[in-house]
Amino acid sequence: MSALLEIDGVSKAYGGVQALSACSLDVAEGTITGLIGPNGSGKTTLFNVVTGYEHVNVGAVRYRGRAITNHAPDQVFKLGIGRTFQLTRIFARLTLMENMLVATQHHEGWARSMVRRGSSAGERRRALELLEFVGLAGHAGEAAGTLSYGQRKLLELAYVLIADPEVLLLDEPAGGINPSLIHYITERIRELNRQGRTFLVVEHNMEFVMGLCERVTVMHQGCVIVSGTPHEVRADPRVLDAYLGGADDEEEGAGAA
Amino acid sequence: MLPRAAGLGLLLLGLGALPLVLSNPTYTSIAIFTLIYMTAATSWNTFAGYSGYIPLGHVVFFGSGAYTLAVAAQDWHLVGGYGMFLLIPLAGLVAGLLALPFGLVALRTRRHTFVVITIAIMFIFQLLAFNLGVTNGSSGIQIPTPLWPAATFNDPFYYITLGILILAVATSWFVRRSRFGLQLLAIRDDEDRARGLGVRTGRVKLTAFVISAIPVGMVGAMYAYFIGQIFPQFAFDPLFDVSVALMVFFGGLGTVAGPLLGAVVLEPLQQYLTLQFSIGDLYLIIYGVVFLAVILLMPRGVVPSTRDWLRARRTGRPDAPEVEGDTDRAAEVAAHTGSPT
């Protein structure tokens, strides 16, 4: 299997805090890769770098062998890399259906969007299918701001999916939601993976990560320290050190959780 | 949909017949100023209401439109008459072209910074109008007056301004229902997230900014022609944007009907106060009171609040809109998708 997404020696500093230092990571096509690490180890920063929300001076990000380092978020998305946010970000005053339709314009020109209606019947049908897929079709006409936290996570997943991305970067998909919903989300991710989508998942819930991911990468202080199967990672003493060592508590939350 | 179309038709008919019913020039002048502000508020809202950015420098487009007409009439030695109205599209074009650099600079910032930058740019233009040779500085420019009979003098101004208003409302309505409008609304709710979903936010915002500038430039030219003279302090009056913003907030930011309602209520009020008490700035005190009342009592504006209230009464639901949002569109989408709300 070739690496679909390669992160090669990326470094990022905020003032004196080194959020990422020479961080490298490969995501193979068709896999679900987990990314774990203590708070402040740089996981979200890495996501931000890949998806164009943060710029780096050192290192490279490649997608299908093509450099996408420091591309703008809309360009990265158009190439087929979708993401969700740790604290879910939905369009609260738009309806669920409208939320779904925001990303449908990815393949049309900017001038075209001005002279067409908000959506075509085909797009609405596809949007409803995806809402059905995450179990929210019954709320299609409601404002997204009325959803619960867990439902927002599902909506965010669904509205990214409408653009048919090949890679999905999920930032804590199981964070702060109840166990039955976690199970539901796990099933959804598995199903999408079976359809051929590649996942990179940041998560603190170990049970979730170990159960779902084929490979797990552990970050600590901006570096990748271990990468392997869930079994290997669990057995590695460096991982325990990173989580329990406590020597660098003062850096917690300095970069990004 | 049918009653709405019928209502719209009746409204247009009423507006068309207004100068025939209220033929007194005092009333038709008030009506013309009201139409000017209705257009300005509608266009302002086409950008501000949908994108969530609050510009306080749209008077730049108003003033530039006014000066376009005045300078063109002066330099080309035009005489007053219907031909002068042909300059109005030109005024719109100039306003639209100015909106490009203005927007490029201002839209690099967000929220409060954006507001401050637009105010700063507005003062730059006012200073230019005072100091550039082409504007004739503080002496202003006289505009040729048409030789029309006094009794119906106002009518051409009224009908052509009404035409510009229809154009602005149609644009606003069209934008709201287009894919482009959806992108603007997404930017309003979370710009960075929209960007991460492939929305080219810079272009979308700038396009909306230019679209909203054009009708403002056109009514600026209309204003200059109607008044018959133009001075920097009136063409680039900071209170223009305060009035327009208040009208939109009063009626309902982001709605099509809100800005129209706001202008219909507040502009005649201002004209009445000015005429009645001969104190030009009295309206500012009233505006202050209105503004506070709107913020305290119905922060979303009259149109959305009334709509929710009516819906709550009709369905017998408690009067509690769950989110600050537009439930009208919610219902519309629900109708499309056939799902229950």
Image: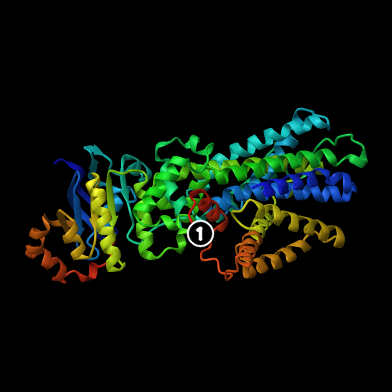
Q: Is residue B283 among the parts visible in the rendering?
A: yes
Residues B341 and B210: in front is B341
Compared with A237, A170 (above or below) is: above
Mark 1 belongs to which subunit? B
List x then y, in percent, for residue A2: 15, 40
Number of callouts:
1
Q: Quadrant of residue B146?
A: top right
Which secondary structure, mark 1?
loop
| Amino acid at circle 1 | Thr
List x then y, in percent, for residue B144: 83, 35
Circle 1 residue: B341
Q: Quadrant of residue B133?
A: top right
Compared with A204, A131 (above or below) is: above
List x then y, in percent, for residue A223: 17, 56
Image position of B266 (left or right of B25): left
Which residue is at 72% across, 35% downward?
A: B88
Crowding at label 1, few (<14), some or many (≥20) Cα neighbours within 10 Å?
A: some
Compared with B213, B89 (above or below) is: above
List x then y, in percent, for residue B110: 49, 54
Q: Is residue B131 among the parts visible in the rendering?
A: no
Which residue is at 22% across, 55% downward?
A: A20
Which residue is at 57% across, 69% downward?
A: B317
Compared with B153, A181 (above or below) is: below
Which residue is at 51% across, 66% downward?
A: B322
Residues B279 and A24: in front is A24
Image position of B187 (left or right of B29): left
